[in-house]
Image (tube, helix red, strand yellow):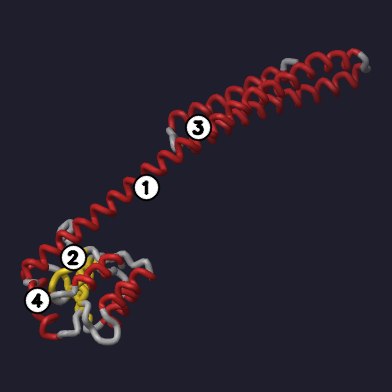
Amino acid sequence: MTDNVPLSVLLVDDEESYATVVALGLREEAGYMVTVASDGREAIEYLRSSKQGFDMVVLDYKMPVVNGLDVLRWMHEERNETPVIMLTAAGSETIAVEAMKLGAYDYCRKEDTDINRLSNVIKATHERRMFRIARAAEEERAREILLNNEATDKVRDVINAITPTLNSAFASISADIETKGDRLLERLQADDRRELRAMLNTIQNQLGRLEAGIRGLLAIYQLTYARYPEAKEIERIRTEFEERTKESTAASSCR
C-alpha cells in the first residue's frame, strides 16, 4: 500500500476457481483492490479503458486466444508501464525469460504460489517500481540541471560579448550628439537652433531609455534562463532601469 491507499491489482486468469480464491485472499489478507479479468482480451480492455489505471497486473501465461505474452506485447506497444507479475507453470522457464524481455517485473510458478507469497511479491514489485520512478525522476532532474547550466554558460558568454558592443555603440552615439550637434547648432539661426536642440535632447533622452531597457532585458533574460528568478534581484533591475530613465530625462531637459 502507498500512503494508506490500497494497491489496485488486475488479476488475469481464465481459471475461474483459481482467480476467485486468489482475488478473495488478496482482498481480505493483503487489503488490495482486485479486479479480475477472465482472459487476455478482457485484460486488454480493462487496461485500455481504466481511468485510474492499475498499480499491478498479475498475469497468467496460459490462456486461450490471447495469452499472457500477447497481453505483454500489447502493453509494450502501447507503452503501458504498469508492473506485471507473470504466472507460469512448472518447466516454463523459457516463457518466464520471454516475459521479462517484454517488460515483466517478476514471475511466479503458479502451483507454488500461495496468497501470502503472492502478496509479498506484489508488494516488493511495487516498491521496485516506485524506486525506478524516483530514480528516473532524479536522473531527469540531473540532466535538466546539467543542460541548463550549459545553456546558461552559453547565454552568459553571448551577453558578455554583446554588452561591450552595445556600450560602445551607445557611447559613440552620445558623443556624436554632443560634439557634432554643437557644431551644427552654431551654423543655424536661433529658431532652427532651438528646434534642433529639442530634437537632439529627445534623441538623447530616448537613447538613455533604450540603453537602460536593453540592460534590464539582458539581465532579466539571464536570470530567467538560469532559473534564478529571485524577486529581490528582479526588483533591483526594475529600480535601476527607472533610475537610469529618470537620469537620462533630467540630463536631456537641462541642455
Q: Nearer the viewer, residue 224 or 121?
A: 121
SS for callout 4: helix
What is the number of the mark on residue 140?
1
* Residue type beneath disc 3: Asp
- State the image coordinates of residue 33 (x, y, percent, origin top left): 16, 71
Q: Nearer the viewer, residue 14 or 246?
A: 14
Q: Residues within 10 Å of mark 3 (few under 14, many from 20)?
A: some
> Which residue is under mark 2?
7
* Residue type beneath disc 2: Leu
SS for callout 3: helix
> Which of label 4 and label 2 is nearer to you?
4
Task: Report how many numbered discs are placed on residues in the image.
Answer: 4
Q: Residues within 10 Å of mark 2 (few under 14, many from 20)?
A: many
Q: Nearer the viewer, residue 230 or 255?
A: 230
Q: Are marks 3 and 4 in contact (CB under 8 Å)?
A: no
Give the mark, 2 or 3, whose residue is nearer the N terminus: 2
- State the image coordinates of residue 224 (x, y, percent, origin top left): 49, 37
What is the number of the mark on residue 153?
3
Instruction: Tell me how far mark 3 sits from mark 4, CA to CA.
Output: 60 Å
Give the mark, 4 or 2, whose residue is nearer the N terminus: 2
- Figure check: 66 above or below 93: below
Specify the quadrant of the image occupied by residue 85. Answer: bottom left
At horizontal 36% and vertical 44% (from top left) the residue drawn is: 141
SS for callout 1: helix
